[in-house]
Amino acid sequence: MKLEKSIFKSYDIRGIYPTDLNEEVASSIAQGFLKTLSEGLNKPIKDLNIVIGLDNRQSSEPLIEKVRDTFLEYGVSVCNIGLVSINDFYFACGNYNYDGGMMATASHNPPEYGGFKMVINDLEVDNKISFIPGIDLYKKIIKMELPLKDEKVKGVLIKKDVLDDHFKHIMSFINLSKIKPFKVVVDVGGGMMGEMVNRIFEKLPCELIPMFFEYDNKFSNRAPNPLDDKASDKCGQMILEKKADLGIMFDVDGDRMFLLDEKGQLITGDLTLLLMSKVLLQENPGSGIVYNLICSHAVSELVTAWGGKAIRSEVGYRNLAKHMYEEGGIMSGEVSGHFAFKDNFYADNGPLALVLSLQTVSQDGRELSEIIKEYRLYARGSEINIKVDSISDKLDLIREEYKDNILDEIDGITVEFDTWWFNIRASNTEPLLRITVEAENDTKLKQRQDEVMKVIN
Protein backbone atom coordinates (compact mmCIF):
# COMPACT_ATOMS: atom_id res chain seq x y z
CA MET A 1 0.00 0.00 0.00
CA LYS A 2 1.29 3.46 -0.95
CA LEU A 3 0.72 6.30 1.48
CA GLU A 4 0.33 9.69 -0.19
CA LYS A 5 2.29 12.00 2.11
CA SER A 6 0.52 15.12 0.83
CA ILE A 7 -2.77 14.14 2.53
CA PHE A 8 -1.16 14.37 5.98
CA LYS A 9 -1.53 18.05 6.85
CA SER A 10 -0.26 20.18 9.71
CA TYR A 11 -3.57 19.89 11.57
CA ASP A 12 -5.49 16.96 10.10
CA ILE A 13 -5.75 14.57 7.13
CA ARG A 14 -7.43 15.50 3.84
CA GLY A 15 -7.26 13.84 0.44
CA ILE A 16 -9.33 13.08 -2.63
CA TYR A 17 -11.46 9.95 -2.12
CA PRO A 18 -10.78 7.22 -3.14
CA THR A 19 -7.67 8.20 -5.15
CA ASP A 20 -5.43 9.39 -2.31
CA LEU A 21 -7.50 8.40 0.73
CA ASN A 22 -9.42 5.12 0.79
CA GLU A 23 -10.40 2.36 3.21
CA GLU A 24 -7.01 0.66 3.13
CA VAL A 25 -5.26 3.93 3.94
CA ALA A 26 -7.88 4.63 6.63
CA SER A 27 -7.00 1.36 8.37
CA SER A 28 -3.32 2.33 8.47
CA ILE A 29 -4.24 5.76 9.82
CA ALA A 30 -6.39 4.14 12.51
CA GLN A 31 -3.49 1.92 13.58
CA GLY A 32 -1.14 4.89 13.74
CA PHE A 33 -3.72 6.74 15.83
CA LEU A 34 -3.95 3.80 18.27
CA LYS A 35 -0.17 3.71 18.62
CA THR A 36 -0.09 7.48 19.23
CA LEU A 37 -2.77 7.31 21.94
CA SER A 38 -1.21 4.27 23.59
CA GLU A 39 2.20 5.92 23.84
CA GLY A 40 0.86 9.37 24.72
CA LEU A 41 -1.38 8.10 27.51
CA ASN A 42 0.91 5.24 28.61
CA LYS A 43 -1.97 2.82 28.20
CA PRO A 44 -2.25 -0.56 26.41
CA ILE A 45 -4.10 -0.34 23.10
CA LYS A 46 -6.74 -2.83 24.23
CA ASP A 47 -7.63 -0.58 27.18
CA LEU A 48 -8.30 2.54 25.11
CA ASN A 49 -11.74 4.19 24.96
CA ILE A 50 -12.25 6.14 21.74
CA VAL A 51 -14.99 8.30 20.19
CA ILE A 52 -15.76 8.14 16.47
CA GLY A 53 -18.08 10.31 14.39
CA LEU A 54 -18.65 11.44 10.82
CA ASP A 55 -20.00 14.29 8.73
CA ASN A 56 -22.31 13.96 5.72
CA ARG A 57 -19.65 13.68 3.01
CA GLN A 58 -20.04 10.75 0.64
CA SER A 59 -16.64 9.42 1.69
CA SER A 60 -17.14 9.70 5.44
CA GLU A 61 -19.27 6.60 6.06
CA PRO A 62 -17.00 4.03 4.34
CA LEU A 63 -13.90 5.63 5.87
CA ILE A 64 -15.17 5.72 9.45
CA GLU A 65 -16.57 2.18 9.18
CA LYS A 66 -13.08 0.93 8.31
CA VAL A 67 -11.63 2.89 11.23
CA ARG A 68 -14.26 1.43 13.57
CA ASP A 69 -13.56 -2.13 12.44
CA THR A 70 -9.80 -1.61 12.86
CA PHE A 71 -10.27 -0.29 16.39
CA LEU A 72 -12.49 -3.24 17.34
CA GLU A 73 -9.96 -5.73 15.96
CA TYR A 74 -7.43 -4.38 18.46
CA GLY A 75 -9.77 -4.72 21.43
CA VAL A 76 -10.56 -1.01 21.73
CA SER A 77 -13.82 0.23 23.29
CA VAL A 78 -15.50 2.43 20.68
CA CYS A 79 -18.26 5.00 21.19
CA ASN A 80 -19.96 5.87 17.90
CA ILE A 81 -21.70 9.26 18.11
CA GLY A 82 -22.88 9.03 14.51
CA LEU A 83 -23.57 11.90 12.12
CA VAL A 84 -22.43 15.07 13.90
CA SER A 85 -20.71 18.41 13.51
CA ILE A 86 -17.08 18.72 14.54
CA ASN A 87 -18.29 20.73 17.55
CA ASP A 88 -20.31 17.74 18.80
CA PHE A 89 -17.26 15.53 18.31
CA TYR A 90 -14.95 17.80 20.34
CA PHE A 91 -17.60 18.04 23.06
CA ALA A 92 -17.97 14.25 23.26
CA CYS A 93 -14.21 13.72 23.52
CA GLY A 94 -13.84 16.29 26.30
CA ASN A 95 -17.07 16.01 28.24
CA TYR A 96 -17.14 12.23 28.64
CA ASN A 97 -13.40 11.96 29.27
CA TYR A 98 -12.58 9.54 26.46
CA ASP A 99 -8.93 8.85 25.68
CA GLY A 100 -9.28 10.38 22.25
CA GLY A 101 -11.36 10.53 19.13
CA MET A 102 -11.29 10.30 15.37
CA MET A 103 -13.85 11.91 13.07
CA ALA A 104 -14.30 11.46 9.33
CA THR A 105 -14.49 14.98 7.89
CA ALA A 106 -12.64 17.06 5.33
CA SER A 107 -13.64 20.36 6.92
CA HIS A 108 -14.46 22.97 4.25
CA ASN A 109 -12.70 21.22 1.34
CA PRO A 110 -14.64 20.50 -1.89
CA PRO A 111 -17.01 17.49 -1.88
CA GLU A 112 -14.60 15.06 -3.56
CA TYR A 113 -12.35 15.18 -0.48
CA GLY A 114 -12.40 12.89 2.53
CA GLY A 115 -10.40 13.22 5.70
CA PHE A 116 -9.96 12.82 9.45
CA LYS A 117 -9.57 15.03 12.49
CA MET A 118 -8.01 13.44 15.57
CA VAL A 119 -7.75 14.45 19.22
CA ILE A 120 -6.20 13.08 22.39
CA ASN A 121 -7.30 13.80 25.94
CA ASP A 122 -4.68 15.90 27.73
CA LEU A 123 -3.51 14.03 30.83
CA GLU A 124 -1.88 17.06 32.40
CA VAL A 125 -4.85 19.43 32.19
CA ASP A 126 -8.45 18.81 33.23
CA ASN A 127 -11.07 19.50 30.55
CA LYS A 128 -8.57 19.94 27.72
CA ILE A 129 -8.29 18.05 24.46
CA SER A 130 -5.31 18.34 22.13
CA PHE A 131 -5.18 17.97 18.36
CA ILE A 132 -3.01 15.32 16.70
CA PRO A 133 -1.32 16.69 13.55
CA GLY A 134 -1.75 14.61 10.43
CA ILE A 135 1.95 14.87 9.59
CA ASP A 136 2.84 13.39 13.00
CA LEU A 137 0.68 10.36 12.20
CA TYR A 138 2.41 9.93 8.86
CA LYS A 139 5.78 9.74 10.61
CA LYS A 140 4.34 7.20 13.03
CA ILE A 141 2.76 5.01 10.35
CA ILE A 142 5.81 4.68 8.10
CA LYS A 143 7.97 3.27 10.90
CA MET A 144 5.54 1.62 13.30
CA GLU A 145 5.30 -2.01 14.37
CA LEU A 146 1.95 -2.58 16.00
CA PRO A 147 1.35 -5.60 18.28
CA LEU A 148 -0.03 -8.67 16.55
CA LYS A 149 -3.77 -8.90 16.73
CA ASP A 150 -5.13 -11.20 19.42
CA GLU A 151 -8.18 -12.84 17.90
CA LYS A 152 -9.52 -13.51 21.42
CA VAL A 153 -9.60 -9.79 22.21
CA LYS A 154 -12.55 -8.03 20.60
CA GLY A 155 -13.48 -4.47 21.25
CA VAL A 156 -16.85 -3.23 22.45
CA LEU A 157 -19.00 -0.87 20.37
CA ILE A 158 -21.62 1.44 21.86
CA LYS A 159 -23.68 4.23 20.30
CA LYS A 160 -24.34 7.55 21.97
CA ASP A 161 -26.41 10.64 21.14
CA VAL A 162 -24.49 13.68 22.40
CA LEU A 163 -26.66 16.50 21.06
CA ASP A 164 -28.79 17.00 24.20
CA ASP A 165 -25.78 17.32 26.49
CA HIS A 166 -23.92 19.50 24.02
CA PHE A 167 -26.92 21.79 23.60
CA LYS A 168 -27.14 22.29 27.38
CA HIS A 169 -23.40 23.02 27.46
CA ILE A 170 -23.73 25.71 24.76
CA MET A 171 -26.72 27.41 26.39
CA SER A 172 -24.96 27.50 29.77
CA PHE A 173 -22.68 30.25 28.41
CA ILE A 174 -25.44 32.83 27.91
CA ASN A 175 -28.29 34.55 29.75
CA LEU A 176 -31.42 33.96 27.67
CA SER A 177 -33.17 36.96 29.19
CA LYS A 178 -30.58 39.24 27.57
CA ILE A 179 -31.25 38.05 24.00
CA LYS A 180 -33.39 40.41 21.91
CA PRO A 181 -36.02 39.13 19.44
CA PHE A 182 -33.83 39.45 16.38
CA LYS A 183 -34.65 38.20 12.92
CA VAL A 184 -31.63 36.05 11.97
CA VAL A 185 -30.66 34.37 8.69
CA VAL A 186 -28.54 31.25 9.25
CA ASP A 187 -26.79 29.51 6.33
CA VAL A 188 -25.27 26.08 7.09
CA GLY A 189 -24.41 25.28 3.46
CA GLY A 190 -25.90 21.77 3.37
CA GLY A 191 -23.54 20.69 6.13
CA MET A 192 -23.77 19.53 9.72
CA MET A 193 -25.10 22.51 11.69
CA GLY A 194 -28.83 22.45 10.92
CA GLU A 195 -30.04 20.30 13.81
CA MET A 196 -28.12 22.15 16.52
CA VAL A 197 -29.13 25.55 15.14
CA ASN A 198 -32.79 24.48 15.20
CA ARG A 199 -32.45 23.41 18.84
CA ILE A 200 -30.82 26.69 19.80
CA PHE A 201 -33.43 28.88 18.10
CA GLU A 202 -36.27 26.92 19.69
CA LYS A 203 -35.06 28.41 22.99
CA LEU A 204 -34.21 31.90 21.73
CA PRO A 205 -36.78 34.70 21.31
CA CYS A 206 -35.46 35.14 17.76
CA GLU A 207 -36.98 34.40 14.37
CA LEU A 208 -34.86 31.91 12.42
CA ILE A 209 -34.65 32.15 8.64
CA PRO A 210 -32.86 28.91 7.65
CA MET A 211 -30.79 28.47 4.52
CA PHE A 212 -29.58 25.13 3.13
CA PHE A 213 -30.41 23.07 6.25
CA GLU A 214 -30.98 19.88 4.24
CA TYR A 215 -27.94 17.61 4.01
CA ASP A 216 -26.21 18.11 0.67
CA ASN A 217 -22.92 16.25 0.24
CA LYS A 218 -22.33 17.92 -3.11
CA PHE A 219 -22.56 21.39 -1.48
CA SER A 220 -24.52 22.54 -4.52
CA ASN A 221 -25.97 25.77 -3.08
CA ARG A 222 -22.71 27.50 -2.18
CA ALA A 223 -19.03 26.77 -1.56
CA PRO A 224 -18.33 24.81 1.66
CA ASN A 225 -15.93 27.57 2.77
CA PRO A 226 -17.82 30.82 3.56
CA LEU A 227 -14.70 32.84 2.69
CA ASP A 228 -14.63 31.60 -0.91
CA ASP A 229 -15.55 34.12 -3.59
CA LYS A 230 -19.32 34.76 -3.70
CA ALA A 231 -20.03 32.11 -1.02
CA SER A 232 -21.76 34.67 1.22
CA ASP A 233 -23.76 36.35 -1.57
CA LYS A 234 -26.98 34.36 -1.10
CA CYS A 235 -26.99 34.84 2.65
CA GLY A 236 -26.38 38.57 2.20
CA GLN A 237 -29.24 38.82 -0.30
CA MET A 238 -31.59 36.96 2.06
CA ILE A 239 -30.75 39.38 4.89
CA LEU A 240 -31.78 42.32 2.70
CA GLU A 241 -34.86 40.57 1.32
CA LYS A 242 -36.19 39.58 4.76
CA LYS A 243 -35.01 42.79 6.45
CA ALA A 244 -33.14 40.65 8.98
CA ASP A 245 -31.06 42.07 11.81
CA LEU A 246 -28.04 39.94 10.99
CA GLY A 247 -26.88 36.74 9.36
CA ILE A 248 -24.73 33.80 10.41
CA MET A 249 -22.81 31.37 8.21
CA PHE A 250 -21.01 28.14 9.07
CA ASP A 251 -18.55 26.12 7.10
CA VAL A 252 -19.94 22.68 6.40
CA ASP A 253 -18.40 20.85 9.39
CA GLY A 254 -19.51 23.66 11.69
CA ASP A 255 -16.41 24.80 13.57
CA ARG A 256 -16.05 28.14 11.78
CA MET A 257 -18.69 30.85 12.24
CA PHE A 258 -19.10 34.12 10.35
CA LEU A 259 -21.38 37.08 10.99
CA LEU A 260 -23.04 39.26 8.37
CA ASP A 261 -24.47 42.63 9.34
CA GLU A 262 -27.96 43.98 8.57
CA LYS A 263 -26.62 45.24 5.22
CA GLY A 264 -25.55 41.73 4.20
CA GLN A 265 -21.83 42.45 4.57
CA LEU A 266 -19.54 39.67 5.78
CA ILE A 267 -17.57 40.53 8.94
CA THR A 268 -14.02 39.26 9.30
CA GLY A 269 -13.18 36.87 12.12
CA ASP A 270 -10.84 39.26 13.92
CA LEU A 271 -13.61 41.85 14.34
CA THR A 272 -16.05 39.13 15.44
CA LEU A 273 -13.45 38.12 18.04
CA LEU A 274 -13.55 41.68 19.38
CA LEU A 275 -17.35 41.58 19.50
CA MET A 276 -17.33 38.58 21.84
CA SER A 277 -14.22 39.65 23.75
CA LYS A 278 -15.77 42.87 25.03
CA VAL A 279 -18.51 41.06 26.96
CA LEU A 280 -16.25 38.21 28.07
CA LEU A 281 -13.77 40.71 29.50
CA GLN A 282 -16.54 42.53 31.34
CA GLU A 283 -17.42 39.22 32.99
CA ASN A 284 -13.77 38.09 33.40
CA PRO A 285 -11.66 41.24 33.98
CA GLY A 286 -7.97 40.94 33.16
CA SER A 287 -8.32 37.67 31.25
CA GLY A 288 -6.37 36.78 28.13
CA ILE A 289 -7.70 36.89 24.58
CA VAL A 290 -5.58 35.00 22.04
CA TYR A 291 -5.41 36.24 18.44
CA ASN A 292 -3.22 35.24 15.52
CA LEU A 293 -0.62 37.50 13.98
CA ILE A 294 -2.60 38.28 10.82
CA CYS A 295 -5.48 39.81 12.81
CA SER A 296 -5.94 43.56 12.73
CA HIS A 297 -3.87 45.55 15.23
CA ALA A 298 -7.26 46.75 16.48
CA VAL A 299 -7.55 43.44 18.36
CA SER A 300 -4.52 43.97 20.58
CA GLU A 301 -5.26 47.67 21.06
CA LEU A 302 -8.92 47.28 22.03
CA VAL A 303 -8.46 44.15 24.17
CA THR A 304 -5.80 46.04 26.13
CA ALA A 305 -8.03 49.13 26.38
CA TRP A 306 -10.83 46.95 27.76
CA GLY A 307 -8.56 45.69 30.53
CA GLY A 308 -7.70 42.35 28.95
CA LYS A 309 -4.42 40.67 28.10
CA ALA A 310 -3.86 40.47 24.33
CA ILE A 311 -1.93 37.28 23.50
CA ARG A 312 -0.37 37.05 20.02
CA SER A 313 -0.05 33.64 18.36
CA GLU A 314 1.09 31.93 15.20
CA VAL A 315 -1.64 31.10 12.68
CA GLY A 316 -3.51 27.80 13.21
CA TYR A 317 -5.97 26.67 15.85
CA ARG A 318 -3.48 24.25 17.45
CA ASN A 319 -1.14 27.15 18.09
CA LEU A 320 -3.88 29.36 19.52
CA ALA A 321 -5.06 26.59 21.86
CA LYS A 322 -1.48 26.18 23.11
CA HIS A 323 -1.15 29.90 23.88
CA MET A 324 -4.60 29.97 25.46
CA TYR A 325 -3.59 27.28 27.94
CA GLU A 326 -0.02 28.40 28.60
CA GLU A 327 -0.76 32.12 28.95
CA GLY A 328 -4.13 32.12 30.68
CA GLY A 329 -6.47 32.90 27.80
CA ILE A 330 -10.23 32.42 28.05
CA MET A 331 -10.90 32.64 24.32
CA SER A 332 -9.08 32.63 21.00
CA GLY A 333 -10.03 33.71 17.51
CA GLU A 334 -8.75 33.91 13.97
CA VAL A 335 -9.58 35.81 10.80
CA SER A 336 -10.66 32.44 9.38
CA GLY A 337 -13.63 32.24 11.77
CA HIS A 338 -12.24 29.73 14.28
CA PHE A 339 -13.25 30.63 17.85
CA ALA A 340 -12.12 28.44 20.76
CA PHE A 341 -12.90 28.69 24.46
CA LYS A 342 -11.12 27.64 27.63
CA ASP A 343 -14.38 26.33 29.11
CA ASN A 344 -15.05 24.33 25.95
CA PHE A 345 -12.05 22.02 26.40
CA TYR A 346 -9.83 24.62 24.66
CA ALA A 347 -11.55 23.66 21.39
CA ASP A 348 -13.43 25.47 18.61
CA ASN A 349 -17.19 25.76 18.87
CA GLY A 350 -19.18 27.47 16.12
CA PRO A 351 -22.62 27.38 17.79
CA LEU A 352 -21.15 28.68 21.04
CA ALA A 353 -19.74 31.63 19.09
CA LEU A 354 -23.22 32.11 17.61
CA VAL A 355 -25.04 32.46 20.95
CA LEU A 356 -22.32 34.66 22.46
CA SER A 357 -22.47 36.97 19.43
CA LEU A 358 -26.26 37.26 19.69
CA GLN A 359 -26.02 38.14 23.37
CA THR A 360 -23.31 40.73 22.72
CA VAL A 361 -25.28 42.47 19.95
CA SER A 362 -28.41 42.37 22.13
CA GLN A 363 -26.67 44.02 25.06
CA ASP A 364 -25.09 46.72 22.92
CA GLY A 365 -28.38 47.87 21.42
CA ARG A 366 -26.97 49.23 18.15
CA GLU A 367 -27.16 47.70 14.70
CA LEU A 368 -24.33 45.25 14.06
CA SER A 369 -22.75 47.42 11.36
CA GLU A 370 -22.49 50.32 13.83
CA ILE A 371 -20.83 48.14 16.46
CA ILE A 372 -18.29 46.74 14.00
CA LYS A 373 -17.56 50.22 12.61
CA GLU A 374 -16.20 51.10 16.06
CA TYR A 375 -13.72 48.19 15.86
CA ARG A 376 -12.53 48.86 12.30
CA LEU A 377 -9.65 51.14 13.29
CA TYR A 378 -7.50 50.30 10.27
CA ALA A 379 -7.76 49.01 6.71
CA ARG A 380 -6.73 45.37 6.75
CA GLY A 381 -6.57 43.67 3.37
CA SER A 382 -7.71 40.17 2.53
CA GLU A 383 -4.96 37.57 2.43
CA ILE A 384 -3.14 37.54 -0.91
CA ASN A 385 -1.94 34.15 -2.17
CA ILE A 386 0.75 34.00 -4.84
CA LYS A 387 2.47 31.01 -6.44
CA VAL A 388 6.26 31.18 -6.47
CA ASP A 389 9.09 28.97 -7.71
CA SER A 390 11.18 29.35 -4.56
CA ILE A 391 9.60 30.40 -1.29
CA SER A 392 12.96 30.77 0.47
CA ASP A 393 14.32 33.09 -2.24
CA LYS A 394 11.30 35.37 -2.00
CA LEU A 395 11.51 35.50 1.79
CA ASP A 396 15.18 36.43 1.50
CA LEU A 397 14.19 39.37 -0.72
CA ILE A 398 11.80 40.55 2.00
CA ARG A 399 14.46 40.16 4.69
CA GLU A 400 16.92 42.25 2.71
CA GLU A 401 14.47 44.99 1.74
CA TYR A 402 12.93 45.38 5.20
CA LYS A 403 15.82 44.30 7.45
CA ASP A 404 15.48 47.35 9.72
CA ASN A 405 11.75 46.82 10.35
CA ILE A 406 11.37 43.07 10.90
CA LEU A 407 9.33 42.52 14.06
CA ASP A 408 9.77 38.75 14.26
CA GLU A 409 9.74 35.48 12.32
CA ILE A 410 7.60 33.30 14.58
CA ASP A 411 5.30 32.52 11.62
CA GLY A 412 6.74 33.78 8.37
CA ILE A 413 8.10 37.32 8.50
CA THR A 414 6.23 40.20 10.14
CA VAL A 415 7.40 43.69 9.20
CA GLU A 416 6.23 46.66 11.29
CA PHE A 417 6.24 50.41 10.61
CA ASP A 418 4.58 53.25 12.54
CA THR A 419 1.54 53.42 10.27
CA TRP A 420 1.39 50.01 8.58
CA TRP A 421 2.55 46.40 8.82
CA PHE A 422 2.54 43.19 6.84
CA ASN A 423 3.11 39.48 7.31
CA ILE A 424 4.35 37.09 4.64
CA ARG A 425 4.40 33.37 5.30
CA ALA A 426 4.60 30.10 3.41
CA SER A 427 1.65 27.79 2.95
CA ASN A 428 2.03 24.48 4.77
CA THR A 429 0.75 22.47 1.82
CA GLU A 430 1.31 24.37 -1.44
CA PRO A 431 4.07 26.41 -3.16
CA LEU A 432 2.31 29.59 -2.08
CA LEU A 433 3.18 32.72 -0.17
CA ARG A 434 0.39 34.26 1.89
CA ILE A 435 0.56 38.02 2.38
CA THR A 436 -1.48 40.16 4.78
CA VAL A 437 -1.14 43.96 4.83
CA GLU A 438 -2.77 46.53 7.12
CA ALA A 439 -2.54 50.33 6.79
CA GLU A 440 -4.27 53.54 7.92
CA ASN A 441 -6.93 53.58 5.20
CA ASP A 442 -7.93 51.88 1.95
CA THR A 443 -5.81 54.17 -0.23
CA LYS A 444 -2.68 53.57 1.83
CA LEU A 445 -3.47 49.85 1.97
CA LYS A 446 -3.44 49.55 -1.83
CA GLN A 447 -0.14 51.46 -2.00
CA ARG A 448 1.49 49.21 0.60
CA GLN A 449 0.21 46.02 -1.02
CA ASP A 450 1.66 47.15 -4.35
CA GLU A 451 4.96 47.98 -2.65
CA VAL A 452 5.31 44.51 -1.11
CA MET A 453 4.30 42.78 -4.33
CA LYS A 454 6.90 44.79 -6.24
CA VAL A 455 9.65 43.53 -3.91
CA ILE A 456 8.59 39.91 -4.40
CA ASN A 457 8.17 40.15 -8.15
Image (spheres, helix red, strand yellow):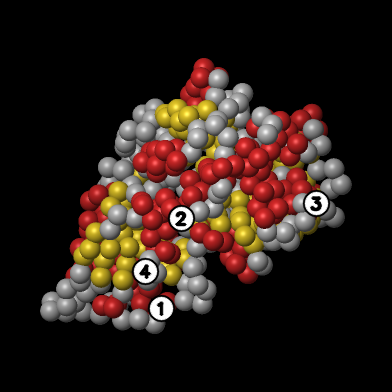
Q: Secondary structure at mark 2?
A: helix
Residue 312 drawn at (x, y percent): 69, 58
C-alpha distance separating marks 3 and 2: 30 Å
Horizontally, residue 62 falls left or right of residue 133, namely left
Dot 2 or dot 4: first in sequence order is 4
Residue drawn at 23 percent across, 51 percent down: 62
Dot 3 or dot 1: first in sequence order is 1
Residue drawn at 51 percent across, 19 percent down: 242
Residue 410 drawn at (x, y percent): 68, 61
Name the residue furthest top: 241
- Is the residue 61 above or below the residue 44 in the image? above
- For label 3, the residue is 305
- What kind of residue is marked 3? Ala
C-alpha distance separating marks 3 and 1: 42 Å
Dot 4 or dot 1: first in sequence order is 1
- For label 1, the residue is 41
Horizontally, residue 243 falls left or right of residue 166, namely right
- For label 2, the residue is 169
Q: Nearer the viewer, mark 3 or mark 2?
A: 2
Residue 98, disc:
4
- What kind of residue is marked 1? Leu
Dot 2 or dot 1: first in sequence order is 1
Can you say which quadrant of the picture contains the C terminus?
top right
C-alpha distance separating marks 4 and 1: 11 Å
Residue drawn at 61 percent across, 55 percent down: 332
Q: Secondary structure at mark 3?
A: helix
Dot 3 or dot 2: first in sequence order is 2
- Is the residue 91 above or below the residue 17 in the image? below
- What kind of residue is marked 2? His
Evaluate if marks 2 and 4 touch, with contact meaning CB atoms under 8 Å apart. Answer: no
Q: Nearer the viewer, mark 2 or mark 4?
A: 2
Horizontally, residue 242 falls left or right of residue 455, namely left
